[in-house]
Image: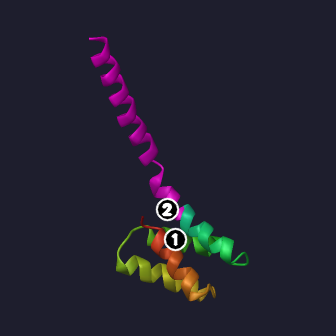
Amino acid sequence: MARRIAAAGGTLSLALGGLVAAAPAASATVQGCTSHVTNKEPNATKELVEDACKTAAGGGEAAFKDCYHLMRDDYIPAVTAADACRKAPK
């Protein structure tokens, strides 16, 4: 009986831990996108990069294109912009 209670408690804690770990994922993707650009291009306009990453976080081809074009308008290199915009919706 004690083993069943311990197993149930362990399962519950793993399930709740998974929920807590999944909760900040949305903001983490925008942060990952923003960090990718600012690490490679320290002179990038941080507000513009953050806005572009938030746009891409919506997912889909249109969101990717909007993110990419916003970054390219700020002269972010094409590869850096594309890589960052791909990171946002994950």
Real-space Cα separation, disc 1 to disc 2, in angstroms: 8 Å
In terms of sequence position, does the residue under pointer 1 or pointer 2 come before the other?
Answer: 2
x and y, in percent, of residue 31 in the image? 56, 62
* Span shown in magenta: 1-30
Give the main secondary structure, helix, strand or loop, of the magenta stretch: helix
Q: Amino acid at mark 2?
A: Thr
x and y, in percent, of residue 84 in the image? 53, 74
Q: Residues within 10 Å of mark 2 (few under 14, many from 20)?
A: many
Left or right: where does residue 75 sit relative to residue 60? right
**Which numbered circle lies on residue 53?**
1
Q: Amino acid at mark 1?
A: Cys
**Which numbered circle lies on residue 29?**
2
Do residues under tags 1 and 2 come within 8 Å of each other at their CB atoms?
A: yes
Left or right: where does residue 11 sit relative to residue 45? left
Q: Quadrant of residue 60?
A: bottom left
**What residue is rendered at 27% in x and 18% in y?**
4
**Residue 45 appearing in the image:** no
**Which numbered circle lies on residue 69?**
none
Q: Is residue 6 above or below residue 46?
A: above
**Residue 58 appearing in the image:** yes
Q: Is residue 50 above or below residue 10?
A: below
